[in-house]
Image (cartoon, grey):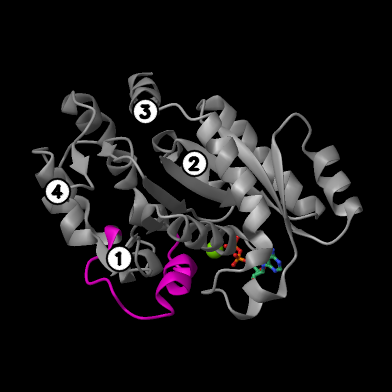
Amino acid sequence: MIIGFLGKGGSGKSSTATQFALWLEKEGYSLLAIDADHNMDFLYNLTQGKEVLSHFLGSSGFDIEDFLDADHSKKYKEIFLETKSKHKFSLLPLDSFSEKYISSIRKNIRVMAAGPQTDEVIGGKVCSHNLTSVLKLYLPLLQVPDKHIVVVDEKAGADGVTTGIVTGLDYAIVVCEPSLHSTKTARQILSLLEKYNTPKVVVGNKITSPEDMDFISQEIPDEAIIFIPASSGVRTKPSEYDPQYEEALQNLFQYLLENYEDKRYERTLEKFSS
Ligand SMILES: Nc1ncnc2c1ncn2[C@@H]1O[C@H](COP(=O)(O)OP(=O)(O)O)[C@@H](O)[C@H]1O
Ligand SMILES: [Mg+2]
C-alpha cells in the first residue's frame, strides 16, 4: 500500500508521516519512506539528520527514462502509456533504479528523497515540482509486497496534488489543524483528490479540546476524520515514537486496511488517457 500525506504547510504532514512510519516499524511492517518535499523534514526525522542518500530523485529524470527504455524527449504521459505493464519497479528484490535511489537506514526502514533545491530551481530554470515528477511514473508502476508500506510526505498545500503524483497513491491522508486556513486548504486538496478518484481520509491534528474536533468536523463535513492530540513530544523529539499517537494511528491504519483497493495503476492510466 502507498500512503501519501498532504495538507497545508505547518499542519503536521511530516510529523504525522514520521509517527506513522515509526508505528508501522514497531508493528513489524517494512517501510519505504519517500520524502517528496525539498525541506526533507521527514527524512531528517527518520535519520536524525544523518546523510544517508547519495542520489536524489530530483536528478533521476534521465535514469528513470533509461530504465523504462524511453526516449528522453518523451512526456511522462507517453512513457506511462507505452509501458503496458503494471509492475516496472520492485521493492523485493530491488530493481536497479530503486537500488540507486533508496538507502536502508534500519532493518525495516528504507528511504528515498526528492533532494535539496537545485541551482536550476533557485535560478528559476525549472520549477521545484520537477524534483518529484519522476514519482508520477514510479508510484503507479511500483510493486509493493505484502507487509510493505510506502509512506510519501508531500509538498505543502494543493501543490502536492497538482504535481500529479496523487493517482499513484492508494490513500491520500489530508492533515489539517483546527484553524480556518488549514481547513480551507484541506477542502481544496480534497476536491482535487475527488476529481482524480484518489481515496482519502482526513487527519485532524494538534487537537486540544472537543471544540477543536467540532470545528474541523463542521468545516470538513462528509469525510472520514481521525483526530490526533496536540503533543509536546513531536515538537521537541520528532525522531522518537510518541505513545500519545498510538490509538489514532491504530484507527487510521485499520481504516486504510478496511478500505484498501489496489487501483493505482488503473487510476493513473485513466488520468493519462484522458
Ligand atoms: N500533534 C502535534 N502536536 C503538537 N505539535 C505538532 C503536532 N504535529 C505537528 N506539530 C508541530 O507543528 C509544526 C509543523 O509540523 P510539520 O510536521 O513540520 O508540518 P508540515 O510538514 O505539514 O509542514 C512543527 O513544529 C511540529 O512539531
Ligand atoms: Mg513537512
Most frequent secondary structure within the magenta stretch? loop
Q: Report crowding for label 1: few under 14, some 14 to 19, many 20 or more residues within 10 A (C-alpha).
A: few
Distance (Cα) linking label 2 and label 4:
28 Å
Q: Which residues are magenta?
A: 37-57
Q: Is residue 55 magenta?
A: yes
Distance (Cα) linking label 3 and label 1:
32 Å
Looking at the image, tell me whether mark 1 or mark 4 is earlier in sequence order.
4
Q: Badges 3 and 1: C-beta atoms under 8 Å apart?
A: no
Q: Quadrant of ligand 2?
A: bottom right
Numbered tag placed on residue 107 in the rendering: 1
Looking at the image, tell me whether mark 2 or mark 4 is earlier in sequence order.
4
The residue carrying mark 2 is: 162
The percent coordinates of residue 36 (x first, y second) are 41, 57
The percent coordinates of residue 34 (x first, y second) are 38, 56
Q: What secondary structure is marked by label 4?
A: loop
Label 2 or label 4, whichever lies nearer to me, is 4
Looking at the image, tell me whether mark 2 or mark 1 is earlier in sequence order.
1
